[in-house]
Image: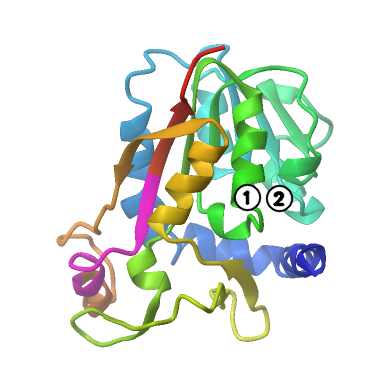
Amino acid sequence: MKQMELDVNVDIYDNFSSEYIKVRLTEGALFNEHIESPVVRDFIKDIKSFKRVNVLDVGCGPGVYTKSFYKMGANVVAIDPSETMIDAARKYCGVSSGHGTYNIDFKPVKLMDYHNDRDFYLVLATFMLGYFDDLRSSFKKMEEMLGRSGRIVTSSLHPERLFAVSKNDTGYLSGDNNRNKKYEADFLGKDAVIHLNKYSFEQIFDAASDAGLKVTKMKEPLLPADYNYHDKLKVDFYSRNHSIAVFELKRKSKK
C-alpha cells in the first residue's frame, strides 16, 4: 500500500510537472524562497567554499537548489523519482542532455533505490519528510551516504499546521487529529492531490536518533512581515504563524 501511494505521487508529478514548476517558482516563493531558503543557507554558512564539495539534492524538483550549488562549484547529484521532473531540472540548470555536465549528475530514482558512488558532505532534502513512509529508514539511508563531518538539511510543514483541524484569520485551530497520519496536499489543484505523511517533532527526533543521527539545529521561521506580496492577509498570517520547520542533522559519532 505504501509503495502504491508513492507511485501515485510520482505519477502526479510526471503529469503535472509544468504546473508544479510554475507554482514552485511563483506562489511557492512565499514558502521556499522567503521562509525556508534563508534558514537552509544559514545552516550551511560555515562552509567556506563549495568548490568540489559533494552535494546530494534529494527530491530535487525543478532544480532550484541544484543550480544554486553547482554555480558555487559543488559536485551535485540531483535525484527525483519523477523522470519528467528530472528533465525539467536539467532544463532549469541549463543542461540540455546527458549526465555530469556542469558538475551535475541527474538521476531519476527514489532515495531508497539510489546507490551512491561517493560520500556527501551535504545531503539536502527540503520539504521531503512528508514523502517518507518510513522515516527511520530514510534517515538511515541518508546517514550512510554522509562523508566525514557531513550533514543533512531537511524540512517539512510545521506540526502546528499539520495537526490543526482548521485555521482562522489569527491562527491554527488545534485538535486531536494525530490519528490521521496523512494529509492531502492540493497545491497543484483539486485534480492533483498528493497524500503525504504527518510527523510530530517527537517522531522526527526519535527516527533520527534511531538512525544514528542527532538534530544539531532546528528553526521554525516566519515570513518577514514586510514581505512584498500581493496577498497582504497571507503575509500577515504567515508572519505570525509557523508554517515550516527546518532541521540540520549530523552523525552521533564520526566514522
- Determine the secondary structure under disc 1: loop
**Residue 62: which numbered mark, if any?**
1
- Where is residue 83 drawn, in percent x and y? 81, 51
Badge 2 marks a residue whose secondary structure is helix
Residue type at mark 1: give it: Pro
Question: Residue 19 appears at what percent x and percent y?
Answer: 63, 69
- The disc placed on residue 88 is 2
- Mark 2 packing: few (<14 Cα in 10 Å), some, or many (20+)? many
Seen in the picture, residue 225 relative to 247 is either above or below; the reply is below
Region rendered in magenta: 236-246
Colour scheme shown: rainbow
Q: Quadrant of residue 42?
A: top left
Question: Picture coordinates of residue 70 (x, y %)?
Answer: 57, 26
Quadrant that contains the C terminus: top right
- Vertical comparison of 140 with 189: above or below: above
Q: CA distance from mark 1 to mark 2?
A: 5 Å
Question: Which disc number belongs to residue 4?
Answer: none
Q: Are marks 1 and 2 in contact (CB under 8 Å)?
A: yes
